[in-house]
Amino acid sequence: MGETDIRCSNQEWLDGVYEKLLVKMHAECERVGTMIPYSPREGRYHDLDGMGGIHNWTNGFWPGMLWQMYEATGEEAYRRAAEGVEERMDEILEGLEGVDHDAGFLFLLSAVADYRKTGNEKSRQRGIYAANLLAGRFNPVGNFIRAWGDGMTAFFGKGDVSGWMIVDCMMNIPLLYWASRETKDPRFAQIALRHAKTAQQYVVREDGSCNHIVGFNSQTGEFVDNPGGQGYEKGSSWSRGQSWAVFGFALSYRHTGDVSFLNTAKQCAHYCISNMAVNDWLPVVDYRAPEEPLKYDSTAGMITACGLLELAEHVGEHEKRFYTEAAFKILRACDAKFSNWNPEEDSIVDGGTYFYHDPSGENTEVPIIYADYYLIEAVLRLKGKALFTW
Ligand code: GLY
């Protein structure tokens, strides 16, 4: 059971993890500074080692971790490193076509987090600019934000992808809710709301499982199909997509007050909880894949845990424990199986899988930066020390 004592109380576990986090992140911040890491090799992060270089959708997670640690500790080194990364990320905004639906992941956790924490006006402008780029991807006949660019045709081996929306984007639209509040211009939030309603109708299935991709005719807005995505197959249930739905719909409830989003988040949460509960609270890559080969994706666990903690903030007193206890179960199971708390090595959570079908194996059960971001957010939420970034 690794170094976690399964008999200790949740509070003891939490306090212990928090202490280890302080040591690990202090060391990591000194080594990594303003690099933009994705996944370590031989215990060390390298700069811009994600698939898309400076444009990689994951590049906001390191500054996000730094802002979270700055919020929790007040240590200036975290703030300085986060600001340095944010400046480097201006290169993304300079090349318009490099920004896709993931503008939210990139800029909520960097520039907008900076603005929320420090009030820096330049950061606010970066956030609003990014929100405009995201809003510009809206398809008004289909009421969805277009996913990816034409490059994905090659990746998925499909034809026209101009009418695709994906579940992941539920985590990007909080950038639009934020921009509307900041600019007092409702158009951003109107786009986010319409996208969320479309996702509710076409992404989420009646049993709480989700499609990864929804294909529409981009000219007419008519539904075409649900192509397979990063999960096992068309019609299966990619666990990270499930976790984006839990957290994303809970956030849309937070930002709009539309109770149907809260209920959709719960529906998806109950599906995730039941699937993890029968597997020692560990997330497999796809909840509808064959039992063998057994493949885990720790990132789905960390994101689901954060989504459950978000949900717990919006339910009645007697319902909170259900979501909080499930979050603890997932976090503790993943910590016991996947954590590396050695401060001499970069990255905490191993066992992340980018997509199910990975002949090279290079993206299967490896440490991935966003597992660490969501672990940190979850732990700091539970400690009452988190910066709200969404
Ligand atoms: N947003 C991309 C992924 O979850 O892999």
Image (spheres, rainbow, N blue to C red):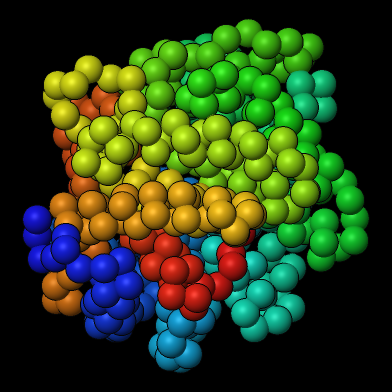
Please tell me in which quadrant of the rendered image residue 179 appears: bottom right
Camera-side residue of 88 and 349: 349
| 209 to the left or right of 166 | left
Which residue is depicted at the point 86% across and 63% down?
A: 183
Q: Is residue 218 visible?
A: yes
**192 vs 337: above or below:** above
Q: Quadrant of residue 154?
A: top left
| Residue 157, image x, y percentages | 41, 15
Q: Quadrant of residue 54?
A: bottom left
Q: Residue at x 90, y 61 (%)?
A: 184
Residue most toward the front?
Answer: 318
> Which is more toward the observer, 323 or 367?
323
**Residue 168 percent coordinates (x, y):** 53, 38
| Above or below: residue 374 compared with residue 96 | below
**Residue 103, visible in the rendered structure:** no
Looking at the image, residue 215 lies above or below residue 261: above
Q: Residue at x 48, y 68 (%)?
A: 381
Is 161 above or below relative to 269? above
Name the residue rendered at 49%, 78% in the picture: 385
Q: Nearer the viewer, residue 114 or 277?
A: 277
In the foreground, 45 or 235: 235
Horizontal and vertical percent position of residue 171:
58, 46
